[in-house]
Image (cartoon, rainbow, N blue to C red):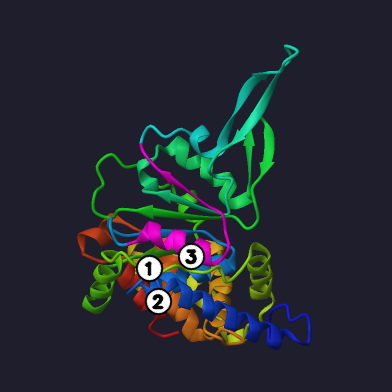
Amino acid sequence: MNGAIKPDDIEDRLAKTAIKLARARAEVGKIIFGQDDVVDRIFMTLLSGGHVLLIGVPGIAKTLMVETISKVMGLSTARIQCTPDLMPADILGSEVLEEDDKGRRSFRFIKGPIFSQFLMADEINRASPRTQSALLQAMQEHHVSVSGQPHDLPKPFHVLATQNPIEQEGTYALPEAQLDRFLMQIDVDYPDEKAERQIILATTSSQREKVAAVMKTNDLLDVQSLVRDMPIGESVVDAILKLVRRARPGAEATESVNKYVSWPPGPRASQALMLATRAKALLEGRNAPSVEDVLALAEPVLKHRMALNYQARANGVTLRDIIHELTSDL
């Protein structure tokens, strides 16, 4: 077995954490209906210490998900509505010149909304490339620089960005470097009939459910550390490596990858799968991940880290087709 197995009581820690996470999921389920897979994957991203990109049309409770999950996890939250005229200072903050009662002037830094533990960047592709890049350093290094001065972000720090897959007028495609910083891309679909019935009954009533905070900031930091301590089998590591390396054009790749893939996943994809599979196992009350976890998470982890060439688009080949082929014989 691989992985950092530190204390002898790791199984007890895992069991207690799984119970607490089950309570957290139940609390979120009071407010969010019919999106269990989406909520679970957001939880997995948080437990892994990563960032998440949500792709979905307006009106399917993306903002409500962020508010509810942050409340249950005990995180401070902020929301940015991205628009073409949004400036980096609107996200990071800025320095203002102040004068005291003795006439002395000095600059004071006023923090922007990025100084929260769970930041929602709504319709991120509507922001200009300059503003999008303001998130790059923060997402990777967990600090920002303003006027040459570094400012640490709170711990933990997570970005949840959303995109509308339909309306593309006035948008700017996210650069590959930024896409790679998201641990997962989660596609949010419409709820089924049963869930939509629950939604309309719950949201049009004067009585609204309230959720309780199940965890605190330090609890989440402890869980993130525990995820990295979880044991992981050699077969799972081998499956991750085989999957990611086969997605890169070359001798190890499949015929379809060599023919259609123009931008393959890098080592961050392997790292993301290692963490996400552990988080999935913990969320489901298991002590170690399995190859099935790798298969289940292949699409949300790889999809935004790959791009297809013109020939693929002309032949109607999608990334889902490519990833399905890659996982079919693992």
For marks 3 and 2 on the same chain, the one whose residue lies earlier in the sequence: 3
Q: Most extreme residue toward the right, as rendered?
A: 7
Residue that appears at 50% across and 41% down: 133
Q: Is residue 12 visible?
A: yes
Residue wearing tag 2: 326
Disc 3, SS? helix
The span from disc 3 to disc 1 (Cα, nearest Å) is 37 Å
Q: Decide: marks 3, 2 in contact (CB < 8 A)?
A: no
Residue type at the position of mark 2: Leu
| Magenta stretch bounds | 61-83
Q: Is residue 253 visible?
A: no
Residue type at the position of mark 1: Val
Q: Looking at the rendering, which quadrant does residue 318 occupy?
A: bottom left
Q: Quadrant of the N terminus?
A: bottom right
Q: Most extreme residue toward the front, as rendered?
A: 206
For marks 1 and 2 on the same chain, the one whose residue lies earlier in the sequence: 1
Residue that appears at 35% across and 42% down: 126
Q: Nearer the viewer, mark 3 or mark 2?
A: 3
The location of residue 196, given as percent across then percent down, is 24, 72
Q: Quadrant of the C terminus?
A: bottom left
Q: Decide: marks 3, 1 in contact (CB < 8 A)?
A: no
The span from disc 3 to disc 2 (Cα, nearest Å) is 33 Å
Disc 1, SS? helix
Q: Nearer the viewer, mark 3 or mark 1?
A: 3
Q: Is residue 231 above or below residue 147?
A: below
For marks 3 and 1 on the same chain, the one whose residue lies earlier in the sequence: 3
Q: Decide: marks 1, 2 in contact (CB < 8 A)?
A: yes
Nearer to us in this view, 148 or 202: 202
Residue wearing tag 1: 257
Q: Is residue 77 magenta?
A: yes
